[in-house]
Amino acid sequence: VSEVPLIFPTVEMSEEEVSGPRRLDMTLASVQSLPKKDMFGKCDPFATLVFEGIEYQTEVKKSAYEAEWNETFSLDIEDASKGVRQDCTVTVWDWDAASKNDQIGSFKIPAARLTDMFRGKIGSAGVEAFTVMEAGKPVVGHDKNRCMVKMNVTVCEVPKPFANIEAAEGTTGPRRIEMTLRSCMHLPKKDGLGSKCDPYAIVMFEGQEFKTDVKRSTYDADWDEQFNLDVAHAEKPLMTDLMVHVYDWDMVTKNDPIGVLTISATRMEELFRSELHSEGQETFPIISNGDPVIGHSGQKCVVDLRVRVVECPFAFDEPAEEKEEEKDKRPGGADVAREDIEKLYKMMDGGDGESADGSEDKGGGGKGEDKKKRGNI
């Protein structure tokens, strides 16, 4: 009697406490010793990997008993400290053109081991061969050997949004990001009676809101709408994250939230400070209650965003308090303005007579009274 060997034993645990987003790059490398499944051929294998409700699929390899896929799927979690709730299941299939695909067998990577690997050292990697099982027994291939699947795994950081854009040193003053909400794909079914989803999105940035059109009865919405995000001082920190909320529009009842994409204020600051005309395009998963939103097709619901950094075409007005501050910086401050007014009154009166405080008029007559009125203005 012995312990079950640890899966991917070369993946090392991090010495520090791990939290926040993490990624495992999981590669379905190959399969060997497949059984004969087709009457007039060999086998047409492909594999599916299901993680946290999301299904990934390799290409089909035609007429083979051994196949190389070498396809990598990025498995992400929002917070490594919370761990993984479900096992990862890999299933091997035989593709059929005319009938239903035949399941050859499957195997699982336990949630507990996945949790450990998500908390592993960045860059730590491993290789493992798994026995394909069916009905509790190993699948035996055409050559009487066990059917085996080879997998590779690497522990990674989740890349920052628009990783190709880097902040530049010394950037100051007004800046603009032209943000285009191109599309939202793999939406979930939200409406009954044969309808699909009526999606629209709201972009929230520094107290501003921008709303797209509603696209009716679709699982894949093409908006291609541009919104201009402006800052007066690129060198100053932002107060809030950028958020893209996706909703399902309803005619009668309250609109249903589908999920949200968040880009941190820190990353937005870096984008505003990047070189002019820097641009990037990327797809982001929509998150609801800490988990990716799964669409009707079993795929992650994703938003396609494009950004471009440009000069802000107009100058921002200075706040009123800043203008007052600049005024008081003049020699004498507000007293200078009062002296200028008094001189103006004297010039209007011929340079003689009472002052603006209403003292006696040396020239006499009605002028003093008039000047007294002006002095009380």
Image (cartoon, helix red, strand yellow):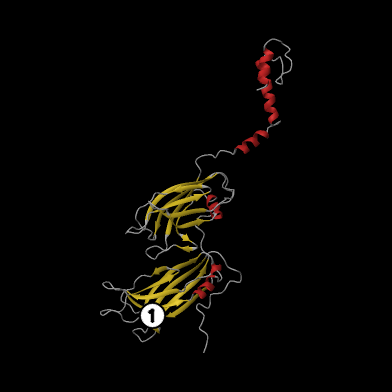
Could you say where residue 267 lies in the image, as x and y percent from the top left? 54, 55
What is the x, y in percent for residue 2?
Answer: 52, 87
- State left or right for residue 329 relative to residue 270: right
Q: Residue at the front extreme?
A: 252
Task: Give residue 136's quadrant in the image.
Answer: bottom left
| Depicted 148 relative to depicted 372: above or below | below
User: Quadrant location of the C terminus?
Assistant: top right
For badge 1, the amino acid type reads: Gln
Across and down, in percent, residue 88 comes to 45, 73
In the image, what residue occupies the spot 37% across and 57% down?
Answer: 197
The image shows residue 228, relative to residue 338, as above or below, that is below
State the residue at coordinates (44%, 77%): 108
Q: Is residue 162 visible?
A: no
Of 306 and 104, which appears nearest the observer?
A: 104
Where in the figure is residue 294, as x and y percent of width and height?
42, 63
- Asked whether 182 or 253 is in front, the reply is 253
Residue located 52% across and 75% down the image? 112
The residue labelled by disc 1 is 32
Extreme residue toward the top, this view: 365
Characterize the local packing of mark 1: few (<14), some (14-19) or many (20 or more) Cα atoms within 10 angstroms: some
Q: Residue at x 40, y 50 (%)?
A: 224
Q: Nearer the viewer, residue 327 or 221?
A: 221
Residue 153 showing in the rendered view: yes
The kind of secondary structure element at disc 1 is: strand
